[in-house]
């Protein structure tokens, strides 16, 4: 899906200007050096002389697609130039089958725990793109309780384990004596009452809940203690939502933009501002004008948000490539990469799409596993 505003913008460049812009973007991404007309003549078959290319580049600079860092330097793409390239000129590379299979196997064998799955996913995405990778955990409304396990853990202690649809578990030891028969009664009643509830619904339950199953009235003390622990476990799981997984920050060191120590320090500090990152990811996935580039089977898209499109002045020199991942048919979280506007957008988009589909498939399988 391309926003109507982008269609209008794209009509403003003729075929020759489009070929020149594509060459400038791809050369600048590869070399990190401003691109001059003589470079384009030497490296690309554009079919025109250097003077013609120079005039075309000057016109595109006047119209905002290119900019000139210094008077004597070549040109580099502007945000508008990158936007045009992403929407109209970029060829999305195909991830080779062997690489895709290795990635999928690495994610699938990482763990059955949500935390480990998302961390491993981000690590692999950072390795594929040489950019820091970020992900958000599923929302409370999308996470269901799958099973409660209660067992005596000694003379005066009881083990309580909660398994959620994402594969995430919460466990704790309760200072509570409980016989094996009472534990069996409790676990059956608790599973009957709570399995299938979302974390949000669990947090609405209090110890004196009126829907206490009849067989639990005779174990009211145990009921209240264990319900309190279950609700606390749900709170802990929800608290994890405020977390954000960030991996591969060292990848920034590969980019010449960060040879400037002050700029690198600013970028690394930005990666630590979780609230700001969450906001920017939310804005990115909410589809700003013209950012959709890759249609996916679940009606989602990989989004590219460039520079000022992020809505934050400190992000003027950076871009986000992101998309949603799913548990079943429900959008659950976001995964993406963050880096300088001079990035390989095609590779980033293809890698983000692959990782989102991979983690979606795994979490969906976990959510329906017996």
Image (tube, helix red, strand yellow):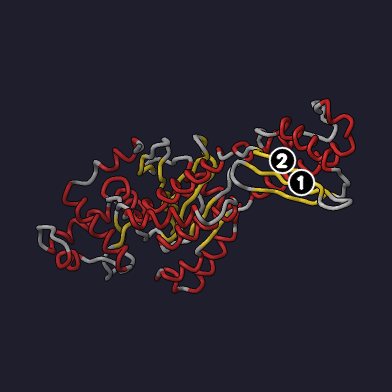
Instruction: Indicate whether 297 appears above or below 53.
Output: above
Q: Is residue 110 left or right of residue 80?
A: right
In the rendering, which numbered label is found on residue 160? Answer: 1
Label 2 crowd bin: few (<14), some (14–19), many (20+), radius 10 Å: many
In this rendering, position of residue 364 left or right of residue 344: right
Which residue is found at the position 64% from the left and 38% from the top? 146
Mark 1 neighbour class, 10 Å CA radius: few under 14, some 14 to 19, many 20 or more: many
> Quick one: 174 or 234, which is closer to the camera?
174
Q: Nearer the viewer, residue 303 or 42?
A: 303
> Which residue was labeled with disc 2?
148
Which residue is painted at 9% across and 58% down in the image? 47
Q: Quadrant of the C terminus?
A: top right
Percent across and percent down for residue 51 are 13, 63
Where residue 247 sits in the image (x, y, percent)? Answer: 52, 61
| Mark toward the start of the polypeptide (1 vs 2) | 2
Q: Dot 1: what SS?
A: strand
Number of disc labels: 2
State if disc 2 and disc 1 touch (CB < 8 Å).
yes
Residue drawn at x 71%, y 48% as measured from the top left: 236
Whole-percent x and y of residue 362?
Answer: 50, 46
Quarter assignment of residue 348: bottom left
Q: Residue 356 at x, y = what percent?
A: 45, 47
């Amino acid at each position: 899906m391309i926003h109507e505003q982008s269609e209008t913008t794209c009509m403003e460049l003729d075929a020759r200007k489009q070929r020149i812009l594509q060459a400038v973007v791809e050369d600048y991404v590869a070399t990190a050096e401003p691109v001059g007309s003589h470079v384009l003549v030497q490296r690309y078959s554009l079919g025109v002389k250097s003077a013609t290319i120079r005039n075309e580049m000057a016109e595109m600079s006047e119209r905002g697609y290119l900019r000139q860092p210094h008077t004597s330097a070549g040109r580099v793409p502007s945000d508008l130039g990158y936007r045009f390239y992403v929407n109209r000129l970029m060829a999305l590379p195909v991830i080779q089958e062997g690489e895709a299979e290795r990635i999928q196997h690495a994610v699938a064998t990482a763990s059955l725990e949500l935390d480990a799955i998302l961390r491993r996913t981000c690590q692999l995405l950072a390795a594929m793109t040489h950019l820091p990778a970020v992900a958000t955990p599923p929302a409370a409304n999308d996470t269901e309780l799958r099973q409660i396990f209660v067992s005596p853990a000694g003379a005066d202690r009881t083990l309580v384990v909660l398994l959620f649809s994402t594969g995430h578990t919460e466990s704790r030891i309760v200072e509570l004596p409980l016989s094996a028969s009472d534990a069996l009664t409790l676990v059956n009643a608790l599973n009957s009452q709570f399995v299938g509830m979302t974390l949000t619904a669990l947090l609405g339950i209090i110890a004196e809940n009126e829907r206490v199953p009849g067989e639990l009235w005779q174990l009211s003390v145990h009921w209240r203690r264990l319900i309190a622990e279950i609700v606390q476990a749900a709170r802990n799981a929800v608290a994890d939502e405020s977390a954000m997984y960030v991996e591969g920050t060292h990848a920034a060191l590969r980019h010449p933009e960060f040879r400037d120590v002050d700029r690198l320090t600013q970028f690394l500090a930005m990666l630590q501002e979780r609230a700001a990152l969450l906001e920017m990811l939310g804005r990115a996935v909410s589809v700003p004008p013209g950012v959709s580039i890759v249609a996916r089977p679940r009606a989602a898209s990989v989004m590219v948000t460039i520079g000022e499109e992020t809505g934050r002045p400190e992000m003027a020199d950076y871009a986000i490539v992101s998309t949603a991942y799913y548990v079943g048919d429900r959008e659950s979280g976001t995964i993406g990469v963050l880096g300088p506007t001079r990035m390989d957008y095609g590779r980033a988009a293809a890698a983000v799409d692959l990782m989102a589909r991979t983690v979606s498939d795994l979490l969906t399988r976990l959510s329906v596993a017996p």
